[in-house]
Amino acid sequence: MLKPIKPKRMSDQVFEQLKDLIFRGQLKPGERLLTERELAQELGVSRPTIREAINKLVAMHLLEHRQGQGTFVNPPTTGADKNPLAALLNGQDASLMDLLEIRLGLECNAVALAARRATEEDVREIEKCVQEMAAAVRAGNLGSDADITFHMALAYASKNIVQIHIMKSLYDLLFHGIQENLQHLYTEPINLDKVLRQHTDILNAIRKRDPDEAYAAMKRHITFVQDFFQERNIE
């Protein structure tokens, strides 16, 4: 049976935009949102519309209100109840290698799906991440923020909501719980160039809509990271 098409409410459209920015990694854990007034001006809607969208994201534990400070993207450290993966691993002493092994399966699958399903906007966002990391490296920085956003953008491009949620939980843990270990990889400048090339290979495979090539490129990337830590006995 056909059903009448209902136009989306303005607050739902605002909600979708903000949610997508969080899931793509463009709004990062701990980052402060623009004020209601600023968001209303930016999006051309009323403040009550913004408030309704934000309250929905707060109810989903994607955002949190802080009295007198503003609204922030929920960091994973706010409680295990807001990160089921954190609750599962609580007290389990999960190592970096444990997480990399899981990434190998999840992210290879994600990029294969992304190669089939990514929109042109998704491809542009992934390309932007690669460009931002390259610019950061040229400026003498690590480019780790762009690296995080790159992987989240890939997960988003898979268009699988379960994949997106799992990857968000995983990256919250990986980049906010074991970030010090990851710094080891970036202390050797040659590794930055290698990671950039690997990211570019993944991007090109998605551009070509080649799931097999995308899968293989991601496998090479994560295996490279695994080998780096194994050779140096970093757990």
Image (cartoon, grey):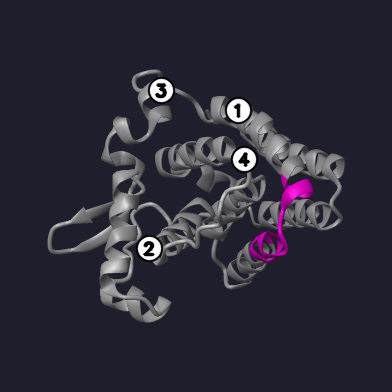
Residue underneath mark 3: 89
Among the two numbered marks 1 and 4 on one chain, the one whose residue lies closer to the N terminus: 1
Part of the protein shown in magenta: 114-126
- Tag 1, which secondary structure? helix
Identify which residue, 175 or 12, lies in the foreground: 12
Alpha-carbon neighbours of circle 3 within 10 Å: few (<14), some, or many (≥20)? few
Q: Mark 2 points at which residue?
A: 11
Amino acid marked by disc 4: Asn
Q: Position of residue 232 (x, y in %)?
A: 61, 32
Mark before the other along the chain sequence, 2 or 1: 2
Residue farthest top in this picture: 92
Q: Mark 1 points at which residue?
A: 102
Q: Which of 82 and 216 is in front in this view?
A: 82
Query: Foreground: 200 or 50?
Result: 50
Q: In this view, does 12 lie above or below 111?
A: below
Q: Are marks 1 and 4 in contact (CB under 8 Å)?
A: no
Horizontal side of 127 relative to 36 (left or right) equals right
Instruction: Report the Cα–Cα distance between label 1 and label 3.
Output: 13 Å
Q: Could you give the CA–CA distance between mark 2 and mark 3, rounded to whole angstroms?
A: 36 Å
Q: Distance between the residues labelled 4 and 2?
A: 23 Å
Which-is-in-front pick, marks 4 and 2? Answer: 2
Q: Is residue 229 left or right of residue 35?
A: right
Mark 4 vs mark 3: in front: 4
Q: Who's the residue at 72% across and 47% down the image?
A: 114
Where does residue 116 sit, x and y in percent of width and height?
79, 47
* Disc marking residue 160: 4
Tag nearer the camera, 2 or 3: 2
